[in-house]
C-alpha cells in the first residue's frame, strides 16, 4: 500500500495581517506550490505577535500535520518573536549559530547592526536546510522538528521556498473540472452519486455568480489518475446537457 500522502499546515504570524494593514500573499502562494508538489494543506491559521500564542499554535499544528510552514516574525525588531516562540514550543533554548552569524557578517559587512544578529539566534538543535542547487553561502531555512520557518516579506518568502521546494515533492494530485450551467440544487444528487462511487476522489462544488457561461464549477481531485478520469466521465454522463465544458 502506498504511504499516506503528506499533509501541511500554514501559520501566518503578525498583527499586521490580523489588523488588515497588510494583505496576505504567502499562504495563497504556498497552497498552490504545495499542491503542485502533491502536498495537501489541511489548515491555515493566523496568530498575532504573541510568543505564547505562537508557541501553543506551533505545538498543536506540529502534532497534527506532517509539515508546518510559518511566515513572519523573524526579523530584528521587538515584534519578531517567532524563533523564541518555536523554541518555547519544543522546550529548547535559543542559541547563536556561528554559521548564521558568519553569513550575516559577510553579507552586511560594515552595514551590520548589532540588532541584525538576532536573526542568527535560533532554537537549539535546529537544522539549516538548503536546496540541492543552492550555494553554500546562501542564507538557509531554519527547521525545528517538522516546522519550516520562513520570512514574512512575500518576495523573500518565495525565494526561500523556491530553494527548498523539492524537499516536499511527492505523489501528484490529478485534477479535472466540470462546468455546469445548472445551479447546485439540481446537480446535487449527481454529485452525491459520484462521491459514493469514487471515495478516493475529492469532489468540490463552487457557484460563481459572475461567470459568463456557467453557474457552478465542479472540481474532481485525487492521487489515482484513472479514478479521477472515470469519476469525471461518469459525472459528465449524469449531468448531460447542463455541462458547459470540461477542463
Image: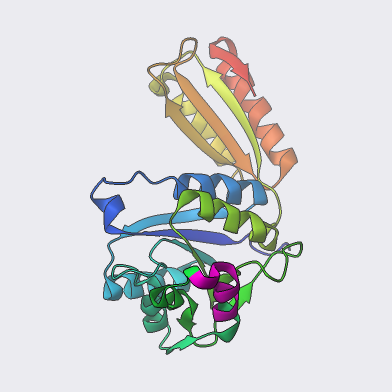
Question: What residue is rendered at 57% in x and 13% in y?
Answer: 244
Relative side of 210 to 245, left or right: left
Q: Is residue 51 above or below residue 200?
A: below
Q: Nearer the viewer, residue 155 or 59?
A: 155
> Can you tell which quarter of the image residue 113 is in?
bottom left
Compared to residue 142, the image places residue 182 above or below, namely above
Q: Is residue 138 above or below residue 209?
A: below
In the image, 96 versus 167, the foreground residue is 96
Residue 90: image x %, image y %? 43, 83
Q: Is residue 79 left or right of residue 31?
A: left
Residue at figure coordinates x 73%, y 66% from the top left: 135
**Eyeballing the image, is 99 above or below 201?**
below
The part of the image, by quadrant, that contains residue 81 is: bottom left
Q: Which residues are magenta?
A: 101-110
Q: Main secondary structure of the magenta part?
A: helix
* Residue 142 forms part of the magenta stretch: no
Quadrant where the image shows the C terminus? top right
Residue projecting furthest to the front:
110
Amino acid at each position: 500500500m502506498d504511504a499516506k500522502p503528506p499533509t501541511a499546515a500554514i501559520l501566518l504570524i503578525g498583527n499586521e495581517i490580523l489588523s488588515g494593514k497588510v494583505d496576505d500573499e504567502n499562504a495563497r502562494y504556498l497552497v498552490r506550490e504545495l499542491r503542485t508538489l502533491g502536498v495537501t494543506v489541511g489548515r491555515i491559521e493566523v496568530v498575532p505577535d504573541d510568543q505564547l500564542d505562537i508557541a501553543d499554535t506551533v505545538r498543536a499544528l506540529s502534532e497534527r500535520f506532517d509539515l508546518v510552514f510559518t511566515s513572519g516574525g523573524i526579523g530584528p525588531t521587538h515584534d519578531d518573536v517567532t524563533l523564541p516562540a518555536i523554541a518555547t514550543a519544543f522546550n529548547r533554548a535559543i542559541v547563536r549559530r556561528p554559521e548564521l552569524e558568519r553569513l550575516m557578517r559577510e553579507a552586511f559587512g560594515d552595514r551590520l547592526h548589532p540588532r541584525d544578529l538576532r536573526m542568527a539566534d535560533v532554537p537549539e538543535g535546529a537544522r539549516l536546510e538548503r536546496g540541492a542547487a543552492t550555494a553554500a553561502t546562501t542564507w538557509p531555512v531554519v527547521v525545528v522538528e517538522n516546522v519550516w520557518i520562513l520570512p514574512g516579506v512575500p518576495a523573500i518568502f518565495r525565494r526561500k521556498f523556491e530553494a527548498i521546494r523539492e524537499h516536499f515533492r511527492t505523489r501528484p494530485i490529478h485534477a479535472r473540472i466540470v462546468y455546469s450551467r445548472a445551479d447546485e440544487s439540481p446537480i446535487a444528487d449527481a454529485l452525491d452519486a459520484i462521491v459514493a462511487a469514487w471515495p478516493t476522489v475529492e469532489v468540490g462544488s463552487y457557484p460563481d455568480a459572475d461567470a459568463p457561461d456557467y453557474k457552478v464549477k465542479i472540481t474532481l481531485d485525487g492521487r489515482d489518475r484513472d479514478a479521477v478520469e472515470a469519476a469525471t466521465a461518469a459525472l459528465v454522463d449524469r449531468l448531460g446537457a447542463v455541462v458547459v465544458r470540461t477542463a
